[in-house]
Amino acid sequence: MTEAAMPGADYIYPNVTEAAQRGGGFLERWHLAEPLGCRYIEIPADFIKNQTEVERTGGQEIGSMLTRSSVELLYEQDAALPGTLRYLLHTEPAIPRRTPPHGRQATASLRWRDPGWVAGFGGDMLLEIEDVLGIPPEIIEIHPPGDRRNTHADIVAGGCTP
C-alpha cells in the first residue's frame, strides 16, 4: 500500500491485535503504519469490553462508558510523539460481549437520541481520551445505531455535537 496505489487517498492503519490496544503503543502503531503509506492510525474508543478491562478498572462493568480514571488506567501516553502522527478514534460498535462468570451477552447501550448520554460520550469520555493521549484526533469514527429508537438524524446530530 503506497501513495501510488490510489492517488489522493488517505490510508488508515487499522486497530490490529498485534499492536498494543487502547492508547498504548502510539509510536509502535505509527512505526508500523508509516512504511505502508498510512496517514493515520486507528485507536479504539469503545466502552469496557472484556474481563481484563473490568479488572484493570477496579470492577467497571462490560459495556459501560469510560470515566477519567478508567481512561487513565487503560490508555498510556507515549513520550516524544512526532508532529506528523495523526490518529482517529474508533468509537463503540455495540458488539455483544460475553460477561463473566456465566458468559451472558452484554451490549453497550448507545443512546444517540439522549442529549445527556451524547454529552457524556463525546463531551466527557472522548475528550478524556484525547487529554490523556496528549494530542487531539483528526477524525472520530461514529458507529451507529445501537438501538432502534436512534434515528439517523439522532446519530448525525450526536456525532456532530462538540
Image: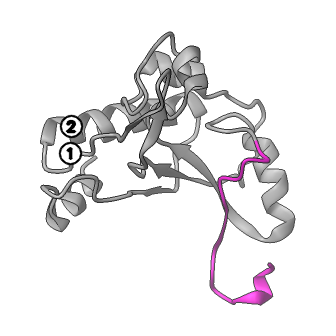
Query: Does the magenta stretch mainly form a helix, a strand or a loop?
Result: loop
Q: Is residue 54 magenta?
A: no
In the image as oriented, which residue stretches furthest toward the top?
58
Mark 1: secondary structure: loop
Asked whether 54 or 23 is in front, the reply is: 54
What type is the residue that disc 2 sits on?
Trp
Where is the N terminus found, in terms of image quarters?
Answer: bottom right
Residue for badge 2: 117
Q: Looking at the image, which residue is at 33% across and 31% down?
A: 124
Query: How far apart in space, not on screen, are marks 1 and 2 (Cα)?
Result: 6 Å
Q: Residues within 10 Å of mark 1 (few under 14, many from 20)?
A: many
Residue drawn at (23%, 59%) of the image: 155
Q: Residues within 10 Å of mark 2 (few under 14, many from 20)?
A: some
| Badge 1 vs badge 2, beta-carbon distance below 8 Å | yes
Q: Percent position (x, y) of residue 18? A: 79, 47
Q: Which residue is at 61% across, 24% downward? A: 52
Q: Where is residue 92? Give x, y as percent.
A: 42, 47
Q: Nearer the viewer, residue 145 or 13?
A: 145
- In the depicted structure, whether residue 29 falls above or below residue 34: above
Please give left or right for residue 40 compared with residue 132 in the image. Answer: right
Q: Circle 2 — which element?
A: helix
Magenta residues span 1-19
Q: Nearer the viewer, mark 1 or mark 2?
A: 1
Given the image, on which type of amino acid does mark 1 rest?
Arg
Q: Position of residue 98 (x, y in %)?
A: 48, 36
